[in-house]
Amino acid sequence: MAITIEKNLLKEWESVIGLEIHVQLNTKSKLFSGASTNFGAEPNTQACNIDLGLPGVLPVLNKEVLKMAVKFGLAINASINSPTNFARKNYFYPDLPKGYQISQLDSPIVEGGSVDIISKEESKNIRITRAHLEEDAGKSLHEDYEGMTGVDLNRAGTPLLEIVSEPDIRSAEEAVSYLKKIHSIVRYLDISDGNMSEGSMRCDANVSVRKKGDTNLGTRTEIKNVNSFRFVEKAINYEIKRQIGLILNGQEIKQDTILYDSSKDETRPMRSKEFANDYRYFPEPDLLPVIIENSFIDKVKTEMPELLEDKRIRFINVFELSDYDADVLVANRDIANYFENVVEITKEPKLSANWIMGDLSAFLNKENLEINESKVSFENLANLILRILDSTISGKIAKEIFEIMWESGNDPNMIIEEKGLKQVTDSSEIEQLVDKAFMENPQQLADLKSGKDKLFGFFVGQIMKVSKGKASPVQVNKILKEKLEK
Ligand code: ADP
Ligand code: MG
């Protein structure tokens, strides 16, 4: 149900938001066991004794996970805690057979740091409280069995990095901007695929409201597990209005945990904080505190990839791209790589950017493919661009060839050869075409000569048509002019 509050009243309020983002780290094996983390396997084929917490087993920390967390910490200018400690977070849930989750409470691996986001076209800093490691729980499958719930433990023990922000966010748009920033950082670092629909990145949004000018924080609610950028925005906007509505009605906000129902676009309480879980955290007795040596951090530093912001600046400086082009290309690391590979061959950044942001993106979008799944390789696109640059083909024919390349996966040079699509630049051939067009359209020619300049375009069109688009438009224009001046 939509909530309506008068615009003037809304203006007096401010929202305060803090996000807890769970990022699934893309290690091959789990946080404390050697079981595989592949997505989509048959239920319960990827959970070993350690993931199930059978008596007598011991967790063994996956070092790769530490490296990934440190990478993230370095990317946001945070401190890396050493020693960093693991703790047991106890609760009962059918998809948590151990009855506890190994997580971190005191001395999380990453503490402090911040990221910049764009809000209302200005840069704004969002502080990060901490990022800690924890293992994921299994999954309850409510839809698959009539009247029963299935439990799939493949996900149990998968490494998560939980990134907790300070309550610095002031609107749903800023929350999305922040979430996208974190998404981009983990993708650039290649520590997660960030796939929200598969649950590799999940977000809890803590929301409160207060009168503008107030410095105290209002009571917050926590919207659980929102799984797309769009829903994060909608859920927060709904919750802000719901809270303001309640307060205007003289009611109090209860510190509830709530669910967002995207099909109805509304939030509803899941459990109240009065029944809040007391997790009875205690230090994990099976894992020693972990010392992170400076030499380890230094080694990770040398392996840090170039991050989005640096790449953006380099694209503008080195390739002389516009801010807009650079923004679009670096938003996805794989697209940025593809672009660099194309430019290395063509040496023409602007034209290469246009092709990637134009035709290639359109074809990818149409078939819902990622750039890594593109049916046109970077070599083939670069070769096509080279043929435009050396005037073998016109830009228009290039579009037709691109479509054939997409369908066949073939090299453009081969397609040009096979289909006889080479541009006609030979002037004697074009002169013949011009003469023929003059002869076949005497009336139009007379009118053009007596001052109807518009007919110039008519003749260009005729000649292009007769040549099936293969005549070089530059040459056609030039020769037409020469003949008319005679
Ligand atoms: P918990 O562990 O119970 O969820 P935390 O204190 O760790 O609580 O806070 C979790 C998140 O809630 C953080 O992102 C924090 O910024 C945010 N937060 C805390 N207080 C508020 C508030 N009054 N309004 C909005 N967000 C808040
Ligand atoms: Mg929380």
Image (cartoon, rainbow, N blue to C red):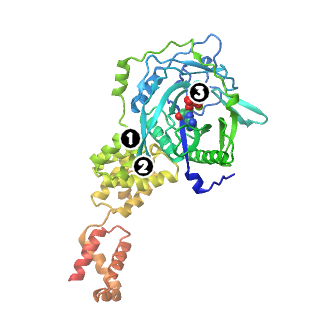
Q: Mark 2: few, some, or many residues within 10 Å (few <14, many ≥20)? A: many
Q: Quick one: quadrant of the C terminus? A: bottom left
Read off the residue under disc 2: 376
What's the amino acid at mark 2?
Val
Q: Are marks 2 and 1 in contact (CB under 8 Å)?
A: no
The residue sitting at 37% across, 25% down in the picture is 300
User: In this rendering, is residue 50 above or below 361?
Assistant: above
Q: Are marks 3 and 2 in contact (CB under 8 Å)?
A: no
Give the number of the disc on residue 136: 3
Q: CA distance from mark 3 to mark 2?
A: 38 Å
Secondary element at tag 3: loop
Read off the residue under disc 1: 308
The residue sitting at 44% across, 21% down in the picture is 81
User: In this rendering, is residue 477 above or below 300?
Assistant: below
Q: CA distance from mark 2 to mark 1?
A: 25 Å
What's the amino acid at mark 1?
Leu
Give the mark toward the camera: 3 or 2: 3
